[in-house]
Amino acid sequence: MNPVNRLCSAEVVHLSRQTKSNRFGPVEHCTIDGKYGDALIILHIRSEEKQTQNMLRVGARAGRPLRQAAASGLTGSRFRSQKISRPLVSRVFMSVGPQGGQESEYHKQGASSHPLRRQWTTGVGIAVASSALLLSGLTGYYLGIANPPEPAVTSTTPLNEFPAPCHDTSSSNIQGAVEEFIGILGKDNVISDKEALAPYSTSEWSSYSPSKTEVSSVVVCPSTTKEVSRVMEICHRRRLPVTAYAGGTSLEGHFAPTRGGVCVDFQGMDQILTVHKDDLDVVVQPAVQWEVLNEELAKDGLFFPPDPGPGAMIGGMVGTGCSGTNAYHYGTMRDWVLSLTVVLADGTIIKTRQRPRKSSAGYDLTRIFIGSEGTLGLVTEATLKLAVKPMNEAVAVASFPSVHDAASCVSEVVKKGVNIAAVELLDDVQMKCINTSQTTSRSWDEAPTLFFKFSGAPGEVKEKISIVQELAENANKKTFTFARNSEEVGELWSARKVALWSILQMKQQPTDHVWTTDVAVPMSRLPDIIEQTREEISASGLLGGIVGHVGDGNFHAMLLFNDDQRQVAEGVVHNMVKRAVEMEGTVTGEHGVGMVKRDYLEHEVGKTTVDTMRRFKQALDPLCLLNCDKVVRVQVPKQGEVPEW
């Protein structure tokens, strides 16, 4: 690229993001007038009284015209930003090259025939241009040196004040980064083949459908924290957006690369690093699957309680703050993470805390990163708490005439203080899907069904089953079955774990989609929201099952639809989320926000709370490189893009 062209396409971004004059108002947007080699950077300043333009001419006359290009998407922005700093002034005005050689070339061509004849044929024109350049330099000096930048004075960042992301995903920048990545990771760990990139954008079960342009340009596979840090240093320097990828099991569009750029695939970081048996904790890398971890821990009589969908990995589990069927008794991912090693957007490596079970030292950075969905940093190691594996487990299954009867049974179990390990609800549609798909080894009663899990000493478990059976009788149960050995435990519980796969088996066409989403409400409102959602699904004509963690008020809807029915599915999900918020619930109990739920967050927690989250994002990732567009918006949406509440 022409050096002057490179200057004007890169440095003007800094101008637009760092220049602000109190006497004129904030920079609204900037353009480059590159006619015939002179780069005229025009900063469009908004004033309450009038529109003004502050012009900076940079670069010597080049041998060929510069591209005329918009340097940022900041039109209409009102964000607060810094004034021109000394380093910036130096970079811009020291970049003005010598003009002598080009002047000679100009005269050789003949002034009368050159396109710039009227502008540059006389010494007066040259003098005027030189004066303008000097004046611009003095103005820059005043803004950056004599009038120092003001610190931000607000505690939050409203959406219209967030600096618009300025990424460089040009082919030349990507190619340069690829060469650097290969130098660090080796050629086998850098993927740029277009066909190989597609799976890193979405999955068969994701509720977000990315556009054709939402695909990474390159995938890198580091194996150490240091390599991740070096990758981020390159991306930060080159302004490349970054998306993290682990198991790919998330559901709300968490790993869709909305800005393209670089995907960091953690497949090479799948090691269980250290098991501290006496301390009941373990240190793992992000691509460790929770099932694999528990297989290893079982050798020492230990286990890690959070149990989301099959194939989920620790990195993604931290990112979404997931839970699973064990959440009723053991809590969520937030309760089982002691410490994290995180690589920040500029490559800085931090460790959030040490290994003790409790600490009151400083801010709880660990919990800030849990549920952040890769928007604040990349988790490269996690220290997890462990539990002693129960000496005995049992499962009981009870079917009921209605969801209300099943929920009534759970309510009585909770009121009686029966200490059960888990309780799950599958509605009649979901049970029918399991039978039809034959994803388990047995046939089930196609009615709303509760799955209970018990743990403890054999006598204790037997007593709990007896109490629950009696309470089920009082709630009009249809059937009640309990496991008599470990094989039956696995068989009975399998129906709950294959719920999603059974819906996928019901596809009529390969192009059909499954939308899996969740909300959570106070437990007393769970029967109401489930029944209302079931009625709407039935009226919509879609096939949809309900799966609920009824012990903590969380349930999932799994909708099967084709391309023509997508708008119908969106309406069902929208109304389901709205009901949850109106019932003082949450837009997501365990799946996370991703792309799909971000516009609902403000209705749940309020605008100022979301603005505070956006300030966290701005503080830790000021260039908005990490998983841009997830959790909170960073650019004002287009008209009609956000569904009406």
Image: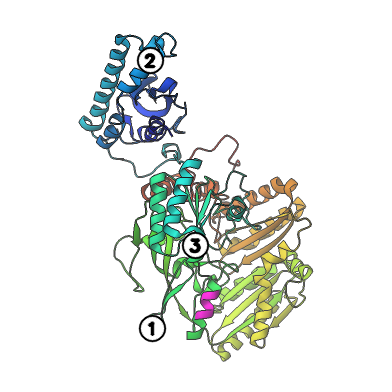
Mark 3 nearby-residue class (10 Å; few <14, some 14–19, many ≥20): many
Q: Earlier in the sequence, mark 3 or mark 2?
A: 2
Q: SS of the residue at dot 1?
A: loop
Mark 1 nearby-residue class (10 Å; few <14, some 14–19, many ≥20): few
For residue 150, what is the image quadrant? top left
Q: CA distance from mark 3 to mark 1?
A: 29 Å
Residue segment shown in magenta: 292-296
Question: Which label is found at residue 266?
Answer: 3
| x then y, percent, for residue 193 | 58, 52
Which numbered disc, 1 or 2, marks the residue closer to the eye? 2
Q: How is the image coloured?
A: rainbow
The furthest residue to the left: 146
Q: CA distance from mark 3 to mark 2?
A: 59 Å
Q: SS of the residue at dot 3?
A: helix
On whether residue 622 falls in the magenta region, the answer is no
Residue that label 1 marks = 278
Q: CA distance from mark 1 to mark 2?
A: 84 Å
